[in-house]
Image (cartoon, rainbow, N blue to C red):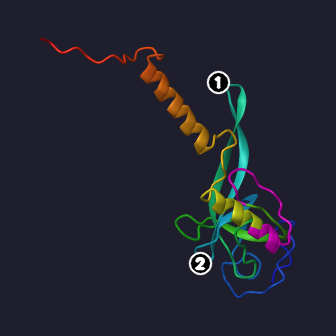
Amino acid sequence: MKKSIGIDIKPPEKECKDINCAWHGSLAIRGRVFNGVVKSAKSHNTVIVEWGYHKFVRKYERYARRKSRVTAYNPPCIHAREGNIVTIAECRPLSKTKKFVVVGKEEKRILDIRGEEQVILKKEKSPSSQEQKASKEKQTAYGNRMKPSGSKNKDATQKEAKETQKRINNGLMRGKSTQPLKEDE
């Protein structure tokens, strides 16, 4: 294992025999270094790392949010998963799209992946069984959706419909003629 790879990062605790590992193999790193969040770790030894930045739009004199997504090699000694904050470094091309390697990860920080919002999660207790039952009862009472706050009950809407029908029949509503049509003689 190398003592230093040229970046001030703590080496991984696990050992691996991967030749494409920056710490235990012969892969040299050079060029750019980024910190980002692992968005996908579905492929074998590959992660997709994403980080956001602001780009100034001259026409509107404001900043627009943008993001960069890069595929990176994930060595077995680091084994980054979705939500981990990782440091990636540029290396020689390992495949058509992989030109970066994961060189470190922050063990204790995991970010929630929900749109643009990234919140540091703490392990929380799961909701108690009483809270779960209460939320299920609310969902089933309204057919798995919450009742809108301004809605009227069925009886009130039926009453309004009957009153409107009475007005129409009595000729009180405009545009509605209640007199029968005269037949041509």
What residue is drawn where x is 73% and y is 61%?
Answer: 37
Q: Please name the amino acid that badge 2 sits on.
A: His
Residue 96 visible to an observer of this rendering: yes
Please state the horizontal and vertical placement of residue 1, each as a whole percent of the image: 81, 84
Please state the extent of the stretch shown in magenta in the rendering. Answer: 113-133
Q: Residues within 10 Å of mark 2 (few under 14, many from 20)?
A: few
Residue 84 visible to an observer of this rendering: no
Is residue 74 one of those drawn in magenta?
no
Q: Can you tell which quarter of the image residue 126 is in? A: bottom right
Q: Residues within 10 Å of mark 1 (few under 14, many from 20)?
A: few
Earlier sequence position, callout 2 versus callout 1: 2
Secondary element under disc 1, as helix, strand or loop, is loop
What residue is drawn where x is 22% and y is 14%?
Answer: 182
Residue 102 is labelled as none
Q: Is residue 119 above or below residue 129?
A: above
The residue pinned by badge 1 equals 59
The residue pinned by badge 2 equals 44
Q: Is residue 8 above or below residue 75?
A: above
